[in-house]
Amino acid sequence: MLAAPCGWWQSHQGQAKGRGATLGRTMEFFAEVDHYLQNFDLTNGINILRLICGLFFIPHIYAKFFVPEALGFFVAAKFRPPAAWMYTACVIETFLAIGLIFAILPVIAGALGFVHLLVAGGAVWKVTKGKWLWNIGGYEYCLFWAICCLIVAMYYAGLG
């Protein structure tokens, strides 16, 4: 009967077991990545809706920094102080965009997007004196977008 040599053989057996554990962790990592990438599967309608809800915030964020009329809206809506409210809205929209685009806490992002856009729709209603159609400055678009965010929140909460 041959005895296994001590030292080298035993140390390499430990490394082999370590490699197996590393391979297992690597496979778990790729399984998590694959699961996360399902959030960007464009054959799934809820992903398209969630992405649209998030991506549509990007031009609004941009406008708050580079379009002077954006501050004029906050003045007309009688937000006091208007610049502070505009930048607050910008911060909120940035978090909403990130959350919705990357599916990070989508229930919270969708619900907060719903509330945020209802407030925006109310401000648009106030400024435009109740105009409905978005193409003439009405609140129709804000309400539609808010409902879309609510649908996203409901879906990820298991209600849809």
Image: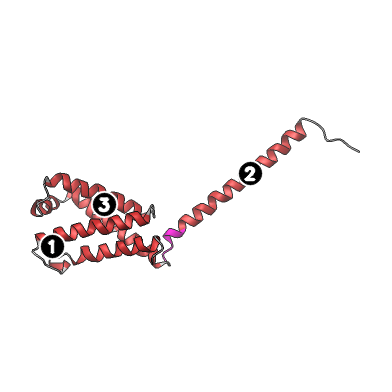
Which amino acid lies under the numbered mark 1 shown in the image of this protein? Trp
Identify residue type, mark 3. Glu
Judged from the image, the secondary structure of the residue bearing numbered disc 3 is helix
The answer to which quarter of the image holds residue 151 is bottom left
* Magenta segment main secondary structure: helix
Residue at figure coordinates x 15%, y 69% from the top left:
133
Separation of residues labelled 2 and 3 (CA atoms): 42 Å
The x and y percentages for residue 160 are 38, 67
Is residue 118 shown in magenta? no
Q: Residue at x 49, y 52 (%)?
A: 33
User: Which dot marks residue 21?
Assistant: 2
Q: Quadrant of the N terminus?
A: top right
For disc 1, the neighbor class at 10 Å (few under 14, some 14 to 19, many from 20) is: some
- The residue under label 3 is 93
Give whichever of discs 2 and 3 has the lower sequence position: 2
Label 1's element?
helix
Q: Nearer the viewer, residue 30 or 144?
A: 144
